[in-house]
Amino acid sequence: MNKPAPSPTIKTDAVIIGAGPVGLFAVFELGLVDVKAHLVDILDRPGGQCAELYPEKPIYDIPGITVINGQELVDKLMEQIKPFAPEFHFGERVDGLERLTGGGFRLTTDQGTALEAKLIVIAAGGGSFEPKKPHVPGIDAYEGKSVFYSVRKVDQFRGRRVLIVGGGDSALDWVLSLAPVASRVSLMHRRDAFRAAPDSVRKMKELVEAGKIDFMLGQMAALEGEGGKLARVIARRDDNSTFTIEADALMPFFGLTMKLGPVAQWGINLHEERISVDTAKFESSEPGIFAVGDINYYPGKLKLILSGFHEAALMAQAAHAIVHPDKKLIFQYTTTSTSLHKKLGVS
């Protein structure tokens, strides 16, 4: 499949790779020191692993918050960074990185986006998340035409017969979102129990009872269609009997797998597939490239969200020196600084 044509280069202060909780908080800390950021994430929404893999899972070690689930934390972080108006590039993976002769970096993504920045912040958790592909013979031939692992434009499914496979939040979210758009939506899961939010399950079952969508138990066995255009899916029940589902678009949601991806090819010193950093600035072996959160390594490292928040705060102090080399940074507290209150819109 051909890559999209390159788009005009976007210039910004910082590019954050990864829009999980630590990447989002990095926007806040950078914003406090007047560093503007764009974020790139392979997922189709913010939150990273926290929102994609365990949105309903309770988190007990965020300071000052007794308990909060993954999605609630992401929602609060998104609200917190609104004053700094970050720009997001979802559904994109950074493929290319080069250092510019005049300083800074140029990044390119698999969707043709080009960004120039004075510094890079890698906040990609354990690496980039990639969809787990179902083990169905010949599925590669349909990818990008009839088989999709994320939704970038809802309109591409308008009037189509869509089969969604899975039982988690992503599967049910898109069942509910595409039901008014597609000509028919079918949901298939291997069992009549779901990992999704209870409200989503309730709404899905109401649509089934109203005859607006179809639900069936089973697993994919084969795909049929010509030239990458899907016509039907052959599915198998637990008793090994088969049945056919007419569909021209298939969306399998089987979870995600983490891979370090192109980062491993950038010449950065690694420690067991994590990026080695100092503990003063959380800068990698490449000047101007920082790593915060689970993707970094240093002696005593703890893979905790709160550790990533601390790392983002120190990274931002160093980032200011790169973006504003002629401007002295005066440390200020958000509780008392009127200038920070103005930035946050609370003055």
Image: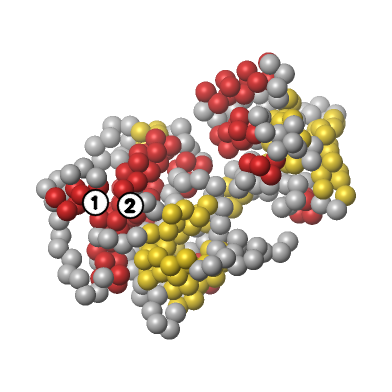
Whether 55 is drawn above or below 259: the answer is above
Looking at the picture, which amino acid does disc 2 mark? Phe
Rendered-image quadrant of the N terminus: bottom right
Does the image show residue 142? yes
Which residue in the protein does label 2 denote?
84
Q: Nearer the viewer, residue 102 or 93?
A: 102
Which residue in the protein does label 1 denote?
343
Q: What is the number of the mark on residue 77?
A: none
Looking at the picture, which amino acid does disc 1 mark? Lys
Does the image show residue 308? no
Q: Residue furthest right?
A: 226
Whether 341 is drawn above or below 232: the answer is below
Q: Residue at x 36, y 66 (%)?
A: 13
Q: Under tag 2, what secondary structure?
A: helix
Q: Residue at x 39, y 35 (%)?
A: 72
Number of marks present in the image shown: 2
How far, Cα to Cα, is label 2 from label 1? 8 Å
Residue 108 lies in quadrant: bottom right
In the image, residue 126 lies at what x, y percent? 47, 55
Q: Residue at x 50, y 72 (%)?
A: 97
| Left or right, 40 with reference to 224 | left
Instruction: Please say if the residues under marks 2 and 1 sit with CB atoms less than 8 Å apart.
Output: yes
Q: Residue furthest left?
A: 336
Rendered-image quadrant of the C terminus: top left
Whether 258 is drawn above or below 217: the answer is below
Residue 195 lies in quadrant: top right
